[in-house]
Image: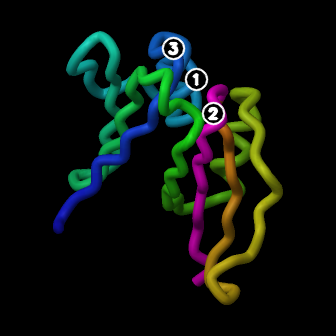
Amino acid sequence: MRAVLAVVPVTNIEKAIEWYSGFFGRDADTRPMDSLAEWHLSELGVVQVFEDTDRAGRTAVNLTVDDLDATLRRLAEQNIESTDPQVVAGGRQRLAVVQDPDGNNLGLIASLD
């Protein structure tokens, strides 16, 4: 395996696109169909936000960031709240969790190395 495509189900795609644009700090990269938006995070990593009311709120996706504190400050400016960062992975990483409006968990992980 070489790449990951994470799918996050939501109840309302238009509201979710607005929220995720604030979360990622930019508009979606593509809208392949009316019920789907994609953010290309790297050459091998894509997050799809997809309207699926039956599955919305039951997903967890972890994303690595270079600077957790800076990311959390930027999110706070967008009125996006997170948990307090916790040290995890045997003291090698910090993790904070954000919930989207549907209750999907988005973990933000930064290395302490």
Magenta segment: 101-113
Q: Secondary structure at mark 1?
A: helix
Determine the CA span between mark 2 and mark 3: 12 Å
Q: Are marks 1 and 2 in contact (CB under 8 Å)?
A: yes
Which of the two marks, 2 or 3, is nearer to us in this view? 3
Residue to which mark 1 is pinned: 19
Q: Which residue is mark 3?
A: 12
The numbered mark, 1 or 2, whose residue comes first in the sequence reads 1
Q: Which mark is residue 100?
A: 2
User: Which x, y percent locates residue 94?
Assistant: 68, 70
Element carrying mark 3: loop
Which corner quadrant holds the N terminus?
A: bottom left
Between 72 and 47, the one lying in front of the other is: 47
Question: In the picture shown, does residue 79 fall above or below 72?
Answer: above
Amino acid beneath label 2: Asp
Marks 3 and 1, the one that precedes in the sequence: 3
Q: Marks 1 and 3: in contact by CB < 8 Å? A: no
Residue occupying image coordinates x 36% and y 47%: 6
- Going from N to C along the chain, the mark reached first, 2 or 3, is 3
